[in-house]
Image: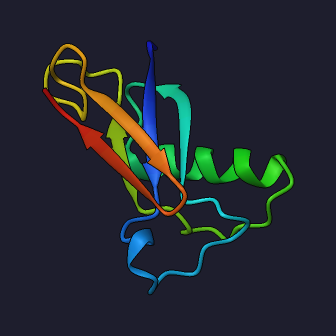
Amino acid sequence: MAEALYLVTKANAQHGGETIINGIHAVLINSDDGGTDAQIIAEAEAQVVAGGHPIPSGYFDTVAAVGDLTSGPLPTDEDTLIILPLATQAVTS
């Protein structure tokens, strides 16, 4: 099984209608590239809890393969992903 890098987020964190715990709205995780989104989210949540942040199951709801450099969130040279206090922003070329 190959590994891949994923951005796991809490959608709509920037709109204020979501409960944000300890300021956490996104994480990067190295996970099996054959895993489902649900598996990747569960792994990310388990790692956040293991890091001392008591988030509930189902806290995150979005997965993007950051390592997919052709159709993922960073498909073009110099594309950048900015992780802001309550949002993620893709800056594309």
The residue that appears at 23% across and 18% down in the rendered structure is 69
Q: Position of 70 compared to 14: left or right? A: left
Residue 65 position by quadrant: top left
Q: Position of 18 compared to 43: left or right? A: left
Whether residue 9 is situated above or below residue 59 in the rendered picture: above
Tell me where residue 63 appears, x and y as whole percent. 37, 47
Q: Nearer the viewer, residue 3 or 77?
A: 77
Tell me where residue 27 appears, x and y as whole percent. 56, 44
The residue that appears at 27% across and 41% down in the rendered structure is 90
Residue 39 in sight: no
Seen as rendered, the residue at the extreme right is 52
Is the C terminus in the top left, top right, bottom left or bottom right quadrant?
A: top left
Residue 36 position by quadrant: top left
Q: Nearer the viewer, residue 92 or 60?
A: 92
Number of numbered discs present?
0
The residue that appears at 72% across and 50% down in the rendered structure is 48
Tell me where residue 26 appears, x and y as whole percent. 52, 51
Q: Nearer the viewer, residue 41 or 25?
A: 25
The residue that appears at 25% across and 17% down in the rendered structure is 78
How has the structure been colored for display?
rainbow
Q: Nearer the viewer, residue 54 or 85?
A: 85
Tell me where residue 43 appears, x and y as whole percent. 61, 44
Residue 67 in sight: yes
Whether residue 24 is situated above or below residue 69 in the rendered picture: below
